[in-house]
Image (cartoon, grey):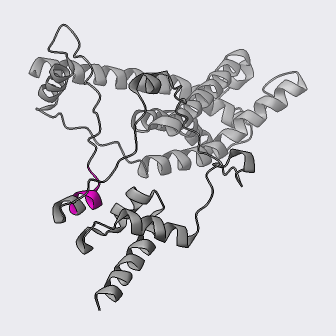
């Protein structure tokens, strides 16, 4: 571990030495460029720190920032590196720039090239102020992402879930049998049979033969809701004539002649006379009222 740290420290020191020597070489060229564009001796001495110094600041920012901020720092680093390369190249092409007593001169014989080079040299200090301030602000406001703490139980829980998701049987389990709904008896009929003992069995409607039921077509079930069909046409109605109230009372009186008062219920009358529950209750009340009147 100590040997590894010493190797890294030696590598960093060597890098710092190389960067320092490269800065000294670039400093000479950038100082002469600054003198050529009209800077005094003090400004020309500080000019290399403005250009190459911002390159070092952008490099440090790329190591700290992430995402879009890191991309911005890389663009600033690339732009100032290219600008420093161009100015060093121009310094090597123009021998007049090497004169120590140089006060001002042209950077290129062609006017458009000279204007472009002067614009580049004079705009770099202003760009250093803007981009340097922006990079420092981004570094100061940067919030590094929290380092996730490894969970000791993560591997174990993953293995447990993986084992649970694996099928234990080679053959898949068959689907469960469908449940048949349990039909409960009508509570009204059960209470009626328990509370009374019929002297006369209640006739039940005749059932159709099994063969006839099996031959009868069954309509397919539909999940769509039924719409209101409106009024039933006369041709589709039952041919049985509608009984009046007096006819219903006569039929109920004849059918319950041998019944006791306790056996006279709406359910029993409904099954015997084959009428609606409302008519059955009306008939029950009418028969009980008649029997009470006859008893008095």
Residue drawn at (60%, 48%) of the image: 129
Q: Is residue 121 visible?
A: yes
Whether residue 265 appears in magenta in the rendering, the answer is no
Residue drawn at (45%, 27%) of the image: 213
Q: Is residue 233 visible?
A: no
Residue 53 point in image, percent of width and height: 50, 37
Q: Quadrant of residue 85?
A: top right
Depth check: 276 or 178 in front?
A: 276
Residue drawn at (54%, 73%) of the image: 246
Depth check: 23 or 222 in front?
A: 222
Q: Quadrant of residue 77?
A: top right
Q: Residue furthest top?
A: 170
Whether residue 186 appears in magenta in the rendering, the answer is yes
Q: Is residue 262 above or below residue 124?
A: below
Depth check: 161 or 205 in front?
A: 205
Q: The N terminus lies in which quarter of the figure?
A: top left
Span highlighted in magenta in the image = 185-191
In the picture, measured across the screen, residue 100 lies left or right of residue 119, that is left
């Amino acid at each position: 571990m100590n040997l590894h740290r010493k190797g890294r420290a030696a590598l960093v020191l060597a890098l710092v030495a190389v960067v320092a020597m490269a800065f000294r070489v670039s400093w000479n060229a950038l100082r002469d460029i600054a003198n050529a564009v009209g800077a005094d001796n003090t400004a020309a001495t500080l000019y290399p720190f403005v250009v190459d110094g911002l390159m070092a600041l952008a490099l440090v920012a790329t190591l700290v920032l992430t995402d879009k901020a890191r991309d911005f720092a890389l663009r600033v680093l690339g732009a100032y590196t290219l600008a420093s390369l161009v100015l060093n190249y121009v310094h090597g092409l123009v021998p007049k720039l090497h004169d120590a007593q140089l006060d001002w001169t042209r950077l290129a014989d062609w006017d458009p090239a000279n204007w472009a080079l002067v614009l580049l040299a004079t705009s770099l200090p202003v760009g250093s102020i803007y981009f340097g301030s922006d990079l420092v602000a981004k570094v100061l406001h940067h919030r590094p992402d929290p380092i996730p703490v490894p969970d000791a139980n993560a591997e174990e829980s993953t293995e447990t879930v993986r084992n649970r998701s694996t099928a234990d049987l080679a053959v898949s389990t068959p689907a469960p049998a469908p449940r048949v709904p349990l039909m409960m008896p009508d509570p009204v009929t059960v209470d009626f049979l328990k509370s009374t003992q019929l002297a006369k069995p209640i006739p039940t409607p005749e059932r159709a033969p099994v063969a006839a039921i099996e031959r009868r077509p069954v309509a397919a079930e539909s999940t769509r809701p039924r719409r209101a069909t409106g009024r039933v046409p006369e041709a589709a109605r039952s041919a049985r004539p509608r009984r009046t109230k007096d006819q219903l009372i006569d039929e109920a009186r004849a059918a319950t002649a041998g019944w006791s008062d306790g056996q006279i219920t709406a359910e029993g009358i409904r099954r015997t006379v084959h009428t609606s529950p409302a008519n059955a209750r009306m008939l029950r009340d009418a028969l009980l009222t008649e029997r009470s009147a006859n008893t008095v």
